[in-house]
Image (tube, rainbow, N blue to C red):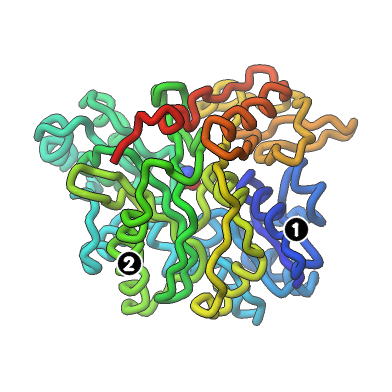
Amino acid sequence: MRVLVIGSGAREHALLLGLRKDPGVDYLAVAPGNAGTATVAEQFDVDVTSADDVTALAVRLRVDLVVIGPEVPLALGVGDAVRATGIACFGPSKDAARIEGSKAFAKDVMAAAGVRTAASQTVDSPAHLDAALDRFGPAVGQAAWVVKDDGLAAGKGVVVTADRDAARAHAATLLDSGHPVLLESFLDGPEVSLFCLVDGAAVVPLVAAQDFKRVADGDTGPNTGGMGAYAPLPWLPESVRAEMVRELVEPVAAELVRRGCPFTGLLYAGLAMTSDGPAVVEFNCRFGDPETQAVLALLESPLGALLYATATGTLAEAAPLQWHDGYAVTVVLAAENYPGRPRFGDVITGSEADSVLHAGTARREDGAVVSCGGRVLSVVGTGADLPAARAAAYRVMSAIRLPGGHFRTDIGLAAAEGRITY
Ligand code: GLY
């Protein structure tokens, strides 16, 4: 099978490494990729938001499958354009991708599907902002205000704060730039990222993971696209994971079928384990980063065959998934000043190991690998237990040098110490 992966993050690097292990995959291409993916796949410089450019490349390379990593091309309909050429595509249609691209659409689908989620209100005018703030957060006894960009914001459109002025300022900035704002009730409890392969009504869950969204240790500092992850979750009973699939994911997949926009690809349920039971924080329409790097490190089943089965509507016939025993931990190395305006162009050394997955990296003419993104790379460690997986990840990280680079030191620590219960 010949496969083209679209994207340039550590998630795509992890997908490529997984695909390379599948004996059924004999050709790999990536666009646009980064300094790390260039060592795994033939690399092409393509505008991933251009349906014409992506489909032209897929046709020229005579690939059997296109895997679209990021949400933006999916929300723009690049998956539909690929399918229109007759090439199988892993990734939902533009209509189904609204489950991530429009929070208002996602809330409507969840309400129709009877899925537990935070109460919310969309605000599209500054005139309605103060009254809406009075209906959420500490104003009504909750821990914080949750203020979100209604559209795509790479994880950085969310502010969770107990400071009304900060909540108001974030909402006002979004409204000023023409973005509707979603105010939500705060869901307490540990968060879970549950990735599911979905083709129409068929749902196959992967092992659950946990993401670390704040930039600094102890869950402090601003939100990011994700600073680390671990999988599976030793504190989450299998029966609860099965219940989450049955009560939160399958009804949404069925509702999307009922609306005439069946989902094909990876449906990412971001959940909070509240005292009233699991509830949906958000759905995403693609693999999440950095959880994917940990989850795929544990997958034993051939990845190419699974993605192809999902893309071609034969997922229900696929063999049960096989997993390696043990745990995996991802730690993200970010550039100086991320998630603010990161500094680019710093030389990275020590990033050659197979367990280093590149994101914002590029190769300079003189051969040096330099930073060119906020999240620069991630390292993945595996081990028989969580402490061993953590130790493996941090050992790899300790060999990497990036001026001004920073990473969290507590990824998976609370779980490893048995401090998370449900
Ligand atoms: N892990 C957060 C995201 O992928 O959006």
The dot on residue 20 is 1
Q: Quadrant of residue 357?
A: top right
Judge whether 313 appears above or below 349 on screen: below
Residue at the top extreme, as displayed: 404
The x and y percentages for residue 103 are 33, 54
Q: Quadrant of residue 136?
A: top left
Q: Nearer the viewer, mark 1 or mark 2?
A: 1
Assign the N terminus to one quadrant of the image: bottom right
Mark 1 is on which residue type?
A: Arg
**Is residue 110 shown left or right of residue 23?**
left
Task: Give the residue at x 29% y 35%.
Answer: 172
Is residue 223 visible in the rendered image? The answer is no
Judge whether 166 appears above or below 288 on screen: above
Mark 2 is on which residue type?
A: Val
Q: Secondary structure at mark 1?
A: helix
Task: Give the residue at x 35% y 29%.
Answer: 419
The dot on residue 72 is none
Q: Nearer the viewer, residue 365 or 282?
A: 282
Q: Nearer the viewer, residue 381 or 83?
A: 381
**Is residue 43 shown left or right of residue 254?**
right
Q: According to the image, label 2 marks what residue?
A: 252
Q: Secondary structure at mark 2?
A: helix
Mark 1 Cα shell of 10 Å, populated few (<14), some (14-19), many (≥20): many
